[in-house]
Image (cartoon, grey):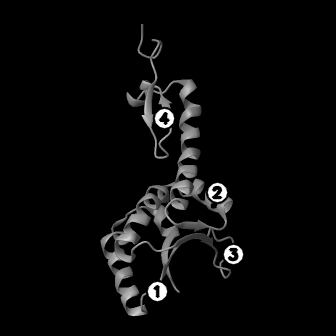
Amino acid sequence: MSILTQTKPNYNVEILSGAPREISPCIWLGFIEAKDVFEITKSFSDDIEKTIFFLRNNNCVISNTQEVKNFLEKHAGIIKYLFEAPNIVFKYFGQSALSLDLIFDLDVEDAEGELVLTIETNLDAKSAHKKMNKIDENWLMKIIDKDMNFFNLNLKFI
């Protein structure tokens, strides 16, 4: 009997939300059965939902949620960095309020837009920009992913 036709138990795997999810062991072994294709594509949508949930639970307001979700479907490389971003920001700025917005350059026709994570701060401009430069040097500039061309950080002084 081949490995793909054997009856295989499912294993519980903890996902970021903490909810258990069953994964066929053939995915772990690198084999994909037809019934698992749906799980894999569903998992991608779940990753976007988990990202939105995670950001909201980390003091981030997302004003245009559906547009952000649609954008992340096209630029999935950004997703893993959105999970890192709050901790990086909090390391330098403390528990700052965050907002995630999809913005467009009105001068560029058919622009895809850019995802911008805005950090609210009450620091003076010099100190805030110094901290932002540290984030750029220690994290953002080290990321080599074509999708990161569509992501940026911004400061909002309060």
User: Which residue corresponds to mark 3?
Assistant: 109
At horizontal 50% and vertical 69% (from top left) the residue drawn is 151
Cα distance in 3D space between marks 2 and 4:
26 Å
The kind of residue tagged 3 is Glu
Please name whichever residue, 11 or 149, is drawn nearer the observer in this view of the structure.
Answer: 11
Tell me where residue 138 appears, x and y as whole percent: 30, 72
> Which residue is drawn at the image coordinates 65% and 78% (left, top)?
108
Q: In this view, does 105 lie above or below 24?
A: below
Left or right: 59 with respect to 29?
Answer: right
Which amino acid, mark 2?
Asn
Q: Earlier in the sequence, mark 2 or mark 1?
A: 2
Q: Distance between the residues labelled 2 and 3?
A: 19 Å
Q: Which of the labelled discs sits on residue 20, or is there none? A: 4
| Tag 1–tag 4 contact (CB < 8 Å) | no
Q: Which of the marked residues, 1 or 4, is nearer the chain's N terminus?
A: 4
CA gap between label 1 and label 4 equals 40 Å
**Residue 21 locus on image (x, y percent):** 50, 33
- x, y percentage for residue 90? 39, 70
Q: 101 or 57, which lies in front?
A: 57
Give the secondary structure at mark 4. strand
Check the image and name the residue furthest to the left: 138
Residue placed under numbered mark 1 in the picture: 122
Q: Residue pushed farthest top?
A: 1
Reading the image, the residue beneath label 2 is 70
Q: Position of residue 143 (x, y in %)?
A: 37, 65
